[in-house]
Amino acid sequence: MQANLTTIRYVIITGISEDPHLQLPIFLLVLLIYLFILCGNATILIACQDPRLHTPMYFFLGNLSILDMSCATIALHKILLQFITGDKTASFGACIVQLHMFGSLGSVDLLILVAMGYDRYVAICRPLQYHLIMSSGICLTLASSSWVLGFLQVTPFTVIICGFSCYSSNEINHFFCDIVPVMKISCNDTSFLETLFFIEGLLTMILMPFLLTFVSYIFIIHSILRIRTSSGRLKAFYTCSSHLTVVILLYLTLFGQYLTPNLSGTLESKKLFALFNTAAVPLLNPVIYSLKNKDVKRSLKRILFHRKPR
């Protein structure tokens, strides 16, 4: 353990693994995943330019694609730069900015998923009023509120961390600056921040969006079960299956990454959850939404090959 440092000008980010034999495989894997994330989500954004997809669901899906590309860039770029330049350091200010941006965008992501869940609820449970309820103004309000609230939720944590003046080390055992590993290297009293992080992280940032999405699906499933024909029930479930799959994947990784009760435990398992959250989930989102979606495939063909809609 190093002596206490009253100030930190830079931090050392250890990365996924310090084994020199694994650096090249890790770099190639992360680079491949990152390129697929960019290409896959850019494909979704291109498809959403089709006038036939100017609907609430694809409006929110476009927001989700932007968030996925942004989160992946913020979290994974240091792994790529470390291999190319050999430099594991980052300024403390850049570390704080990364911490704030990643947390904020992750929070916005969850709120956008809530909005998408509400959209599916209205589409299935109140189909005759769908266009009235999910107007363009309402969709814009839901999306903009998600972005503003997402950034505001993380601000208290960032402000508290900026006030820390004592650190036991400048080495962060992670592949990017996240709140838990930064908290672990501080020799200030972090009990208040840990309590705030657990309570607000549990109740406001993660559990509340989860419950709102869960409630939407209770009503959705209830409405689907009331459909008389099996083909009708299957069609209704199909319209929300992609969203439900993404929600399950994301919340499973978030619970493992942030809501384990012992913050003082090993960070290795949290690294794995974080890697899945920042790499696998954004990679799978466009696959889940596009491969199963005939509308997206048709729109891509019309845009890329300049085909007129039938």
Image (cartoon, grey):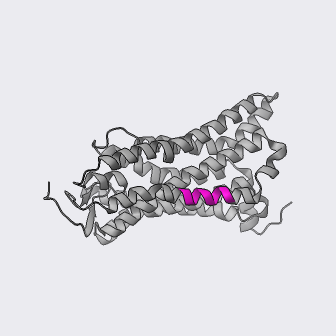
* Quarter of the figure with the C terminus: bottom right
Count of numbered circles on the image: 0
In the image, is 132 to the left or to the right of 243? right
Q: Residue at x 60, y 64 (%)?
A: 42
Residue 32 appearing in the image: no
In the image, is 225 to the left or to the right of 91? right
Residue 239 horizontal/vertical position (percent): 72, 43
Vertical position of residue 90 compared to residue 182: above or below: below
Q: Give the range drawn in magenta.
A: 141-149
- Rendered image quadrant of residue 65: bottom right
Is 204 colored magenta in this rendering? no
Q: Which residue is drawn at 70% across and 47% down?
A: 119
The single residue placed furthest to the right in the displayed view is: 310
Vertical position of residue 286 compared to residue 225: above or below: below
Towards the viewer: 177 or 4: 4
Residue 35 horizontal/vertical position (percent): 50, 63
Q: Residue at x 79, y 60 (%)?
A: 52
- Rendered image quadrant of residue 248: top right
Query: Which secondary structure class fits the magenta region best?
Result: helix
Towards the viewer: 81 or 274: 274
Residue 211 appearing in the image: yes
* Quarter of the figure with the N terminus: bottom left
- Rendered image quadrant of residue 90: bottom left
